[in-house]
Every structure is written in structure tokens, then in C-alpha cells.
Amino acid sequence: MEQKREKFSSSLAVFLATLSSAVGLGNIWMFPYITGENGGAAFIIIYLICVALVGLPVLISEFIIGRGTRRNVHGAISKITNKNRFKIISVFAILATYFMLSFYTVVVGWVYSYLYKAVIGALKGVTSETTSILFYNTSVGPIAPIIWQMIALLVGGTILVLGVKGGIEKLTKTLMPVLILLLGICAFRSLTLAGAMEGINFLIKPDFSKVHIGVVLSALGLAFFKLSVGSGAMITYSSYYTDDNNLIGTAGKVAISDTLVSLTAGLAIFPAAFSFGLEPSSGPGLLFNTVPLIFAKMPGGWVLSIIFFVLAAMAATMSMISLLEVLIVVFTEELKMERKKAIIMNVIIIALVGSLAALSGNPNGILGNKLVFGLTFFDLFDTLVSKILLPINGLLIILLTGYFINKKYLTDQLSNNGILNNELTIKTLIFIMKYISPILIIIVFLKSFI
Ligand code: PHE
């Protein structure tokens, strides 16, 4: 049964909404710290290869599935696979989305709490001891991390009540340009500090001695995570695309812009970190321990700290709503539930499962010593998503489009029924989808487990 569905209103709206899902904590939190831990530029080069040869083809595949079927992830996969084994993709996608939201909302909550701290001036003049205490108070709880996570979920739920055009489109059209401007300001300040060159070198001079197969798996996982593929978010958003949208063009623009945002975030953090003699490889704590220290040492740092956490909060919120939207449309279309009810149900489910992550996000948290397969819940959800579910689902999606979807259907979607005149691009893309992306995913995956 066809349902009446909303659509984005223009190509610009499509681009900004899609970019807003891609740009998130991945750019501002993960990309800098993973780059910091894995040899700077060397990691970036491997990451770019993963984006081009794997992330981008999977992203385009998701667009084909989403816009082609105009359904939620479950409906889309069922329609396009026509009952074959690939139906498992939607199960993996929904699982990945729940697990991802469970830990993502924890970090969104931390970001909100740091924004609050920045505004009230609590980050002024911090030292390395006081930043650890602040982070402890934010993430150990039991109350603080749960409350901030709830606030994050409430913000996300409220935006989504307003729907696709009134909520997602309006918000992303307004906030994405602001976000990019604010990030530019932070990068400019960082680059104009004395000693910034060392940080720039870190980002452009590769140190391949730190690269091993685990690093390549991290780069691949990050490429999936960054481009929001494997979880159904891009299938869902592209189900709202306009009919005349150039899918390959949008995917290319999103991947390039997203990478530029990550690099700019790197430029906002590393030169400043080096300039003040701070460690760039401090891991996940980079954003919450190192970054406040940088601002405390910087002239004009208070205002910049607010700017920085405002932009981080905006990026994190927009990615979070793209994940929530996946589940909400599954509920409204498959379970025929009213949108508001679907939002409330999902917020409750995520708050419940997510509290496990909220209480173990810091090793000192109440559940910080409860290990499952040797990992805390927080790390377990993250690992399950980034290292297992997203790559496997990415592989299945690319195999599905490369080998099982009717070639004419693919070409029609990618050329908008012949209007775009891009046969050569499509041929090259299908070649990469069939022979390059799946083989790369399989090699990286097997190598890192054997
Ligand atoms: N791309 C988002 C980020 O970088 C995360 C995300 C993954 C969002 C998958 C939606 C779906 O933070």
C-alpha cells in the first residue's frame, strides 16, 4: 500500500540534510582522536582511499535503494530484494541504529553538558587536573550522564515531531551553514597561534610506521560511520529525495564536504594542541579533556570554547536525528503507528538500552567494570556497530546493488531515466561496486580477525 510521504523541497535541501547526517561527532570527536592515535597523515591517506573506493559506492547504493523505493529501511530492502536472503540487511541496519543511538546519545549528552559548562564559564582557566574532574563529573554519574542523555533524546524527539520538511529540512538548512562558519572561525584561530606549524605537519606528513591492519579496519569503519552508511540513515533520507536529484553528484558532494569538515576540525584542534604542548593522541578524551585545556590557554578562549561546543552540539544533534528518523519511519510505515507515538516509543527504548552505555561511558562509571566480551557496554555497542555491523551491512548492500539489482533499474536511477547522460560514470561505478569495494571490505575484515 502506498503511503503519502513527505519529500525535501529542493536539491539544496537534499544536499544539506544529507550532509547534516554525515557531519557529526565522527568529524569533531572521532576523526581527530583516531587520526591522533594512528599516525596523523598516514591514517588520513588510508581513510581517503576507504571513502573513495568503499564508502562512496555504498552511499550511492543506499541512495538507489532509498529513492528507488521511497520506503523506510525495512520496506525498502523488502521491496528491492523481493524476498531473497539480502533481507537481513534491514535487520542489521535496525540493530545497528539502536546500538549506535545508545552510545551516540551519551556523547551528544556530554557535548551538551560541555556547552553548558562553557556558557556558564566553568571551562575558564581549567588545568589538566580540573578538566579530568569535570569529565569525571559529566560522565561518571549516575545522575549526570543519564540526564544529559535524556535531554539529547528529548531535543531529537521534539525536532522530529515537526516532520521531514518542517523539522529536518528547516533545521539543517539553517544550521549547516552556521556550523561551517563557526568551524572556520575555530580553525582560523588555531592556525594563527604561534607554533601552529607542528600541528599542520602532523596532519600532512605521514608516519607509516604506526599503520597496521587494525588501523586500516579503523579507517574503513570510520568511513562507514562518517558517511552514515550501513545503518539505514541514508536509505531513509534518500527516500525523501526529489525525483530529479543527481544521486552520484549528491554522494560525491557529500563525501567531499564531509571530509573537508573533518580536516577543518583537525585544523581547529591539532595546531592549537601542539602550540600549547598538548598530546594529540589522548584518545576519546581529546574533545573533553584536551580541547577545554586548549581554550583555557588561548587568548579569547572563552568565546571560542562556546563557539566550538555550539557547533559540536549542532553537528551531533543533526546526526542523531537522522538515526532516530530511521526507526520512526519503520514504526510509522511497517507498524502503522502514528508519528508522535513512534517517536515516544523509540525515545523510551533508546533511553533504556542507552542507560547501559551512559553508565559505562567512563571506566569509573557504575557499570564501568561490567565487561561483556571484555568490553564495557559503551565500547561493546561502539565496536559492534563500527567494526562489525556497519562493515558487514556495507558489504551486503554493495553486493546487492552490484550483483542482484536489475542493471536497467540501476542505470535508470543513476541517470534519472537517461536524462543525465552519464553512462561512463555509471559504468565505472558499477565496476567498482562489483569488483573493488566488496573485495576490499572482505580483505580488511578477514585480515583483521585472523
Ligand atoms: N555520520 C555521523 C557522524 O559522523 C554518525 C552517523 C552514522 C549518523 C550513521 C547516522 C548514521 O557522527
Image (cartoon, helix red, strand yellow):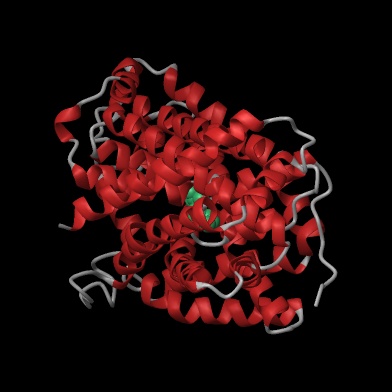
Q: Quadrant of residue 418?
A: top right
Q: Quadrant of the C terminus?
A: bottom left
Observer-nearest of 233 and 392: 392
Q: What is the count of numbered marks?
A: 0
User: Residue at 66% across / 69% down in the picture?
Assistant: 79
Q: Position of residue 192 (x, y in %)?
A: 44, 16
Q: Position of residue 15 (x, y in %)?
A: 69, 41
Q: Position of residue 213 (x, y in %)?
A: 20, 44
415 vs 36, left or right, is right
316 vs 339, left or right, is left
Up the image or down, 446 lies above or below 344; here it is: above
Up the image or down, 30 lies above or below 38; here it is: below
Q: Quadrant of the N terminus?
A: bottom right
Observer-nearest of 147 and 432: 432
- Report whether residue 192 is seen: yes
Up the image or down, 75 lies above or below 399; here it is: below
Observer-nearest of 212 and 128: 212
- Report whether residue 130 is seen: no
Q: Quadrant of residue 235?
A: bottom right
Observer-nearest of 249 and 430: 430
User: Residue at 76% across / 81% down in the picture?
Assistant: 338
User: Residue at 63% across / 38% down in the picture?
Assistant: 248
User: Residue at 43% across / 37% down in the picture?
Assistant: 53
307 vs 411, left or right, is left
Q: Position of residue 138 (x, y in %)?
A: 39, 62
